[in-house]
Image (spheres, rainbow, N blue to C red):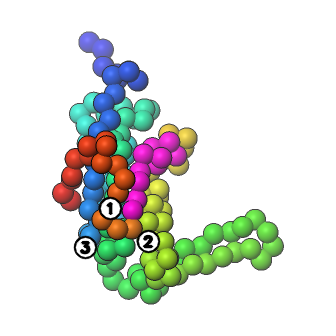
Amino acid sequence: MKTYSMKQGELAKDWLVVDAAEIPLGRLATQVATFLRGKHKPTFTAHMDMGDNVIVVNASRVKLTGNKLDTKVYVHYTGYVGGQRATPLRKLMDTHPEDVVMRAVKGMLPKTRLGRKQLTNLRVYKGAEHPHAAQQPKTVEL
């Protein structure tokens, strides 16, 4: 007996809405990464982009446990001499809270072309409104 493998034409992608209000950032990111990869489906195939499209709302109200708001710092390097930049989490939450959620989910996806493609199926919004009503998304409780 052969193992069944999904074909690209057989995929059915849903649209899901996740409310991030008062949910710890790590728990939110793991669930969203699972939905993006498609691991919650019984037909999961590791080498295909078969996950759902996920809309995260209320990113500004995500919960941060412990002392992370004061101690966590995001660091990146521009490529130039002396070009290391550090942004505290508190400043990033004030200006761009959707980037905090996006970075957390990105860290839990594969670091390959497939992972970058799956990340394009994620939309994060600061408030409770989103412009994707035409896709008739289903609300998911975490």
Looking at the rendered structure, the secondary structure element under dot 3 is loop
- Residue at image point 34% right, 49% down: 132
| Segment tinted magenta in the rendering | 115-125
Write down the residue under mark 1: 129
N-term mark: 3 or 1: 3
Q: What is the x, y in percent for residue 8?
A: 40, 23
Looking at the rendered structure, the secondary structure element under dot 1 is loop
Q: Nearer the viewer, residue 90 or 42?
A: 90
Q: Quadrant of residue 7?
A: top left
Give, as a three-letter code, the residue at label 2.
Answer: Pro
Write down the residue under mark 3: 22
Pointers 3 and 1 in contact (CB under 8 A)?
A: no
User: Crowdedness of circle 2 by 10 Å Cα count: few (<14), some, many (20+)?
Assistant: many
How many labels sit on residues? 3
Q: CA distance from mark 2 to mark 1?
A: 15 Å
Q: What is the x, y in percent for residue 89?
A: 48, 79
Q: CA distance from mark 3 to mark 1?
A: 17 Å
- Is 57 situated above or below 115? below
Whether residue 39 can be seen here: no
Give, as a three-letter code, the residue at label 1.
Answer: Glu
